[in-house]
Each structure stands twice: as C-alpha cells, then as structure tokens.
Image (cartoon, coloured by chain):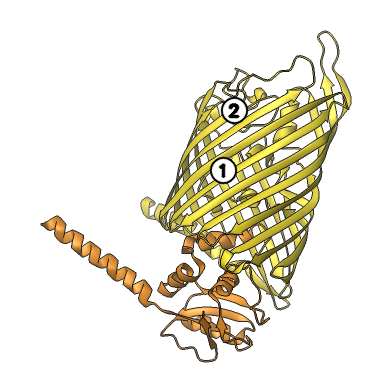
Chain colours: A yellow, B orange
C-alpha cells in the first residue's frame, strides 16, 4: 500500500508540470497570454575549497533559482512581456527577486525591429539564457565566460536594442543586435561580496553599456559563428570601513569609476544530428580608479572554453567541456603585485567537466556533473568563484566539485 | 549464428524505421489569406524559427506545428535542420528571454488543418494523406 502510494505520488509529481502548462495560457480581449515559469535546485560538494560562496566543502543545497514570465502579442508586429527572477546561490542573490526583463518589442520588418525596457543582453552564445538551467546540457556553464557570481555584469540592460536578420541568399544569413542601456548590479552579486572581505559595502554599482552582437548562420548547415563587443562606463558607490589596531573602525564614503572598460567575445557553434560542439573566447578589460580617485586597478581577464554535447535519446544527454581563465592585473597601490607566472594558482582557473543529463519528461531534468579544477583565480582582486572570506583556512591549488541539479520548466 | 540473425533483424528494423520517416511525406498548408502558392525552403525555415513574420509577397504569417509524430519529425529535420528536442530548446530560449512566444502546437493533422483554415496568416504542415479541405497547399521550392 505504501509502495503504491509512493508511486502514485511520484507520477502525479511528474505530471504536474504538463498540467500546469495547460492551465497557464489564456486569452484577454482576444489576445493570447502565455505564462511560463522555471525553477532549479542543486546540490554542490567539493573536496577542499568552498566555491561560489556556497559551503561546498560540507555539501550545500544553497543553489536555488527560478522565474516566471507573462507575455502577450498585441498585434502581428508588437509584443510585450515581463519576467521576474530570483536566486539564492550561497550568498549570491539572497532571495531578492529582480525584474529580469520587461520589454515592449516592435518588429517593423524581419531585418529591423526595436525592443525597449529591461532587456536581456544578447552577447555570445549563452549570455541571455545563462540562468535557464533547463536549456543547457551543463549544470554550471563554463565559468571562464559565464561566471555565476558576476551574472549582473552582463545579463541585462535598462535601455533598448535594435535587431534583425538579413538573408544573404547563398551565404546564409546575418543576425545583428545593437544595444545601449544602464547596467544595474544587485547588491548581492560577486563583486560587492568580494569587497566585503576588506571593509567595502557597495550600495550601488552600474552605468552605461553600449554594445553589439553579430552572428552569421553560415551556408554550412549547422555552423554558426559570431562576435560581440561592449564598452561600459561604470560607477560604484557605498562605504568603506577601515580598521586599525587599537583604534575604533572608521567608515568613509567610497567611490570607484571606470577609466576604460570593454569586453570582446568570439564564438562558434556546430550542430550535426545529435552532436553539438561549441567554443567561445571572452576578454574583459577593466580599468578602474578606486578609493575616491586614489589609485588605479586594471584587470585583463581572458577566458575560453570548448564543449561537446551528445543527445543519446529524448531522455539522455552527455556533455563535457574544458574551460580556461587567466587574469593579469595591475594595482597602482605600492606593494600589490601579481604572481609573475600564469601557472601560479592565483593567476588561473582551469576546469575539466563531465556531465550526464536525464530528461524525465519535457518539463523535468536531472543533471549530475563533475568538475576538476586547477587554480583558484585571483581572490581578493577579482571575483572568480573563490573568495577568501569563504576559505579562511587558505585556498588549495586544486578543487574537485560534484553538482547534482534538477530543474523544471512549465 | 544466433548473433548474426539478431544483427540482421535489428538492421532491418532500423531500415524500416528510417523508411517510415521518409515515407511520411509532408504537405505544407496555409490559410487562404496568404497570397503566394509557393515558398522557398529558406523562407519556410525562417517562419518556423520565428525570424520571419512575413513572406516575400508581404503576407504576414504565423506558424503552427504538430506536437509530435512522424510528419512532425520529418518536417523539423528536413526543413529546420533540428531535432525535436533542439527545436523545443530553441523556442524556450526565445520565450524565457523575452524575444518570442511559443508557437501554436496541435495534436493531429485534422486540428492543424482546422486551425490553419480559420486563422489569418497561419501556415502549417500535415502528413501527405491528410485532408486539406479549406486550406491551400504551398509548394516548397
């Protein structure tokens, strides 16, 4: 009896997403309204170092996110919609929901459309979909290009896009997006968290981003190549608390701003049958004046990955990727010098990953993923998944990480 | 000998399955509001990947799909160059980034024909043997 009850419960649980999907499309004044949602829950365990602000060395379930959206097509050319997103990954997000996107989109022609509001930023292969666990083979996208702790840096802008697709007859087609808008980071992102280790408390961080993406669907069936570029002018404000031995802490106003920040990304993807190959390279140049115009910090972050994923059948997919991230930095403050060689563990983070994804049905998937990491980036200088305040015992040069993650989409 | 027999039976079954998919020839159909009687393969692909909302003659189009079946799989593979799972992932990436809506998907040829017949600009596909009363057939060039 107990076994039968358990089986019925599991079947009902599996059927629930499909039932919910059927219920959440309706009509208002003759216009179809679509409502969709997603959620994921993960478990992460590492052998030594704690990763992505989670207590992974003890095993952590603090890896939850989800979102819900609604959209309506008002005319053949005009759509509006919005999505709310929330996450709690260690101390990232901390259950502070965000307006993920809210757009009005008008398509004049197939080759020219405009969208405005809070817009997901088209950049590289996966930037605008990086939160959607159910869309990806991997439980964690390559952090060299899509760092979870720096999600806010590139994920959306409050502004607008122009976009379109231009057919090239025998040469495939070109899809372009040009965007401009304001970046507004959450107070619960990786960079504010990084600064808290030394007394920083950022209350605002953001600024103007202007960029473009151009991708070519080549005449070779299944091959896509592209490039993205972005320049930004960022300002951060808050407070900084300085502590001196024998003295009471002193809190002062804090400001930092860009001299010159930009990001370039190049990418390619090839799909043939059930096999998908992808590779991306990103370079982020950050030149900031910090501590109220006191000194300058430059970081030159370069990352790339190569991945392969193979779908065996509707229920099973395997994937693997190799990710490399290196950081070169300069701090004009006397006494701060980077390690001379990129082979030093505080100059790089290399990651070898293998994944199995099981699709229980079209709404529910489970992933099991292993990471074999070499290096820990440059903690204290730039967010890279490893934070000194989470690893008081000191960082070990290698980290093995297991992630089990389940996701739903309706 | 037994293993050899199993191999040939398996090979025959695989061949039969492949033949069944090819044999599920597809008819592309459209609402009578669409002016043209033919469409290029590239246009058809653009319509069903939501990159085109009108045909070369200016007709606004709205795609409608079959949810599953041999005709659906053949259409998705032949004209869109994707697997069914990859197509579903593609549509969801549009929906969850605010760049598109999930297209209409219906369970049977009869439902697709009925929807296309009554919906201005609708374009769909059915198996070759389906009745297409009330809609026009489009030649794919």
Q: Quadrant of the C terminus of chain A?
A: bottom right
Kind of element beneath mark 2: strand
Kind of element beneath mark 1: loop
The residue located at (56%, 23%) in the rendering is: A343
Residue A380: quadrant of the picture:
top right
Q: Is residue A410 placed above or below B21 in the rendered structure?
A: above
Which residue in the rendered view is the most extreme toward the front?
A170
Q: Is residue B129 left or right of residue A267?
A: left
Q: Is residue A15 left or right of residue B30?
A: left
Q: Residue tagged by mark 1? A: A141
Q: Is residue A375 placed above or below A231 in the rendered structure?
A: above
Residue A170 coordinates in the image, percent (x, y):
56, 67
Q: Is residue A36 visible?
A: no
Q: Is residue B56 visible?
A: yes
The residue located at (73%, 67%) in the rendering is: A112
Give the mark toward the camera: 2 or 1. Answer: 2
> What chain does mark 1 sit on?
A
Q: Residues within 10 Å of mark 2 (few under 14, many from 20)?
A: many
Q: Residue tagged by mark 2? A: A348
The residue located at (58%, 67%) in the rendering is: B49
Instruction: Confirm whether circles 2 and 1 share one chain.
Output: yes
Mark 2 → mark 1, Cα distance in angstroms: 17 Å
Residue toward you, A278 or A127: A278
How many dots with numbers? 2
Residue A179: quadrant of the picture:
bottom right
> What chain does mark 2 sit on?
A
């Amino acid at each position: 009896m107990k076994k039968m009850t358990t089986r019925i419960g599991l079947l009902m649980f599996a059927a629930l997403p499909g039932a919910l999907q059927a219920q959440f499309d309706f009509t208002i004044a003759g216009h179809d309204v679509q409502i969709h949602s997603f959620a994921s829950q993960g478990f992460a365990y590492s052998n030594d170092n704690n990763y992505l602000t989670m207590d992974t060395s003890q095993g952590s379930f603090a890896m939850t996110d989800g979102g819900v959206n609604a959209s309506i097509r008002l005319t053949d050319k005009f759509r509006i919609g919005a999505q709310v997103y929330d996450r709690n990954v260690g101390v990232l997000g901390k259950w502070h929901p965000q307006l993920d996107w809210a757009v009005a989109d008008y398509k004049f022609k197939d080759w020219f459309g405009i969208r405005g509001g809070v817009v997901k930023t088209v950049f590289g292969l996966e930037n605008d979909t990086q939160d959607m666990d159910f869309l990806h083979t991997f439980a964690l996208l390559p952090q060299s290009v899509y760092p979870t702790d720096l999600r806010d840096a590139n994920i959306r802008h409050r502004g607008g896009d122009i976009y379109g697709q231009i057919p090239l007859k025998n040469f495939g087609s070109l899809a372009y997006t040009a965007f401009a808008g304001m970046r507004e980071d959450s107070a619960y992102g990786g960079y504010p968290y990084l600064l808290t280790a030394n007394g920083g408390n950022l209350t605002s961080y953001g600024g103007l981003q202007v960029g473009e993406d151009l991708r070519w669907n080549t005449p070779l069936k299944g091959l896509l190549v592209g490039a993205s570029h972005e320049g930004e002018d960022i300002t951060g404000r808050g407070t900084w608390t300085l502590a001196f031995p024998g003295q009471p802490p002193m809190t002062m106003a804090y400001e930092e701003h860009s001299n010159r920040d930009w990001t370039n990304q190049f990418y390619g993807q090839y799909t043939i049958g059930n096999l998908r190959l992808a590779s991306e390279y990103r370079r982020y140049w950050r030149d900031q004046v910090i501590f109220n115009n006191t000194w300058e910090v430059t970081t030159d972050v370069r990352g790339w990955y190569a991945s392969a994923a193979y779908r065996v059948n509707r229920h099973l997919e395997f994937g693997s990727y190799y990710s490399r991230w290196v950081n070169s930095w300069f701090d004009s403050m006397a006494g701060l010098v980077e390690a001379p060689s990129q082979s030093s563990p505080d100059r790089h983070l290399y990651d070898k990953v293998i994944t199995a994804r099981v699709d229980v049905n079209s709404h529910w998937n489970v992933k099991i993923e292993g990471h074999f990491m070499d290096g820990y980036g440059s903690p204290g200088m730039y967010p890279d998944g490893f934070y000194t305040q989470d690893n008081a015992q000191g960082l070990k040069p290698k980290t093995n990480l297991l992630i089990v993650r389940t996701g739903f989409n309706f | 000998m037994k293993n050899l027999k199993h191999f040939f039976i398996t090979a025959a079954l695989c061949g039969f399955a492949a033949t069944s998919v090819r044999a599920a020839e597809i008819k592309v159909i459209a609402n009578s509001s669409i002016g043209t009687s033919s469409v290029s393969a590239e246009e058809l692909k653009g319509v069903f990947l939501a990159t085109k909302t009108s045909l070369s003659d200016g007709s606004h189009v709205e795609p409608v799909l079959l949810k599953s079946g041999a005709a659906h799989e053949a259409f998705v593979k032949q004209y869109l160059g994707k697997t069914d799972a990859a197509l579903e992932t593609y549509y969801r990436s549009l929906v969850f980034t605010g760049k598109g809506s999930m297209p209409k998907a219906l369970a049977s040829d009869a439902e697709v024909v009925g929807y296309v017949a009554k919906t201005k600009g609708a374009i769909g596909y059915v198996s070759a043997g389906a009745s297409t009363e009330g809609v026009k057939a489009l030649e794919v060039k």
